Amino acid sequence: MPRWKRWLDLTTIFIFSPVLVFVAILVSVYIKVVSRGPLLFRQDRTGMNAKPFRCLKFRSMKVDADHAAHQHLMQELIHSDRSMTKLDNDGDPRVIPGGRWLRATGLDELPQLINVLRGEMSLVGPRPCTTYEFIHLTPFDYERFNAAPGLTGLWQVSGKNRTTFREMVDLDIYYCRHLSPAMDLKILAMTPLTVLSQLVDLIVNRWKRSIRRNGKKQFKVLSIHKSEHRKLNWTYEGEPRGRCQ
């Protein structure tokens, strides 16, 4: 890792450490209150020079969550031109209460600052690659491991969930080829707007799901009313009008 990049990481963390520690404590307390299980989620990722490391995150899913659905989704995304939409967008039942908000704001990734301090990650870099994704990459894609993975990066501020897997890899490679202090500072400056955009998307998706749910409930109630109406008409068929209750 270039010296300037390491210096930028450590200096930024030091400056914002009071706020970061305070927010991390709040998130920790919240997770322990709303969900049983460990506070942190640990997952093997592939870092710089394809070296594996243990990536840390705040746990935003239930302890008994089945991860097979995520692997199936990633397999489909890798071999298709679908945008990298998360399962959260459709109301993933595996997520703890408030977990979608933690993910949309990126607060679940605060423990990765420990990975940054260890030198396993950087504040800015390619998306940390999972072991499952790594086995599906081509030799050309290995160029994305020429830089340390980051909490944020060129892919995150360039559309993220609106891009395909192939576009994500290409953005990571572009970043590695044009690595510079100016690019890192620009990406850091763009990240808050990206987080705000993700929050807006989350609110819109929740609103759409609410409309769909309410529409289904209204349709069900209307169907019941029609059924009861037909039943009453059949029951009282031929009876004097005044006797119908």
Image: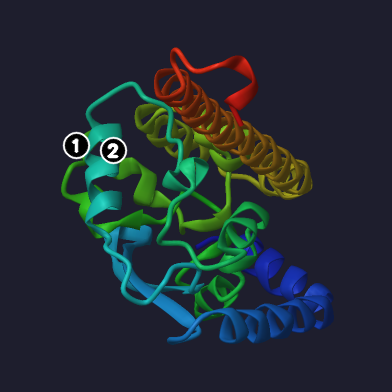
Depicted 63 relative to depicted 169: above or below: below
Who is closer to the viewer here, 223 or 129? 223
Q: Tell me the crowding category of disc 1: few under 14, some 14 to 19, or many 20 or more residues within 10 angstroms, Cα based.
A: few
Residue located 36% across and 61% down the image:
47
Give the residue number, with chain letter if any, for mark 2. 141
Who is closer to the viewer here, 37 or 141? 37
Residue located 50% across and 23% down the image:
229
* x, y percent for residue 68: 22, 56
Q: Which residue type does callout 1 highlight?
A: Thr
Q: Which residue type does callout 2 highlight?
A: Asp
Residue located 16% across and 49% down the image:
135
* x, y percent for residue 220: 49, 32
Quadrant in the picture for the C terminus? top right
Depicted 6 relative to depicted 85: above or below: below
**100 displayed left or right of 226:** right
Q: CA distance from mark 2 to mark 1?
A: 5 Å
Q: Are marks 2 and 1 in contact (CB under 8 Å)?
A: yes
**113 displayed left or right of 105:** left
* x, y percent for residue 4: 65, 61
Depicted 183 relative to depicted 93: above or below: above
Give the residue number, with chain letter if any, for mark 1. 138
**217 displayed left or right of 38:** right
Who is closer to the viewer here, 208 or 70? 208
**83 displayed left or right of 154:** left
What colouring style does the render use? rainbow
* x, y percent for residue 176: 47, 42
